[in-house]
Amino acid sequence: MGVIAEFSLAPEKLSFATALSAAPSVEFEIEREYGTRSATPVAFCWARGDDLATFDRGLERDETVTDIQRLSESDDRRLYRVRLTGTAPVMTYDAWIDLGAARLEMCYTDGRWHTRMRFPDREALTTFSGFCDEHGLEFRLDRLYDTDPSDGPPRDRLTSCQRETLQLAHERGYFDIPRQATLGDLAEDLGVSNQAVSERLRRGCARLVGDLFG
């Protein structure tokens, strides 16, 4: 039976390191990535936050990406299409593709890459975590569960960031009437931006509702 792992990685040796270090408050998500072994992957990515201009300048200087296209934007979010150059100190794409894994989510926030990935078995996960350790990526496993939905409640399909934010919002009375805490209160407790908290709450609630009625 397959397993789903939630883990985080240190960002310094991975693609986008220059852009992310230029604007650390920005929340960055890889929506989709595709490629072959004969070509560097193309990625569609969302950046969200209050410092997108600085992030853009960092992205232009980042040697790990090229062919940068801004596909859409608003005041606090932008969608990019980029091609990875393969010059990052460590490239994980071929490693997890070769293991038969599928990446479900990958988001940079709080100074680390938070990833949710499906592996065909625990041995494949162990092999991937070994690859990360060998390349100095500081692999931290946050949660592991079987892919059979009967083995766990809907909350198991939340990311660790979404789960943490929803739990804090509940404990602080954000969902109470009248509301006992604001987005700003939650953001201060979590050490992230108001926008990041808002995105986590919306995505987490959407996932729970989707699990309930999907």
Image: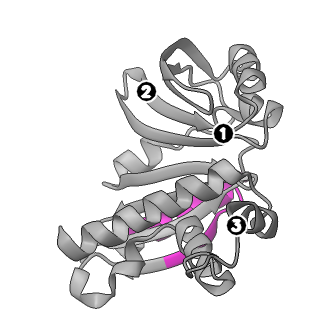
Q: Single out the residue that lies furthest toward the front.
A: 178
Q: Amino acid at mark 1?
A: Leu
Q: Quadrant of the C terminus?
A: bottom left
In this rendering, the label closer to the viewer, 3 or 1: 3
Q: CA distance from mark 2 to mark 1?
A: 14 Å
Q: Position of residue 44 (x, y in %)?
A: 44, 29
Is 39 above or below relative to 20? above
Residue segment shown in magenta: 124-143
**Number of numbered markers:** 3
The residue to which callout 1 is attached is 14
The residue to which callout 2 is attached is 41
Residue at image location 64% in from the left, 52% down from the top = 196
Give 177 or 80, whichever is nearer the viewer: 177
Q: Position of residue 67 (x, y in %)?
A: 52, 10
* Badge number at residue 182: 3
Task: Report if residue 128 is visible in the image.
Answer: no
Is 124 above or below relative to 46? below
Q: Position of residue 153 (x, y in %)?
A: 33, 86
In this rendering, the label closer to the viewer, 2 or 3: 3
Q: CA distance from mark 3 to mark 1?
A: 34 Å
Would you say 22 lies left or right of 165 here?
A: right
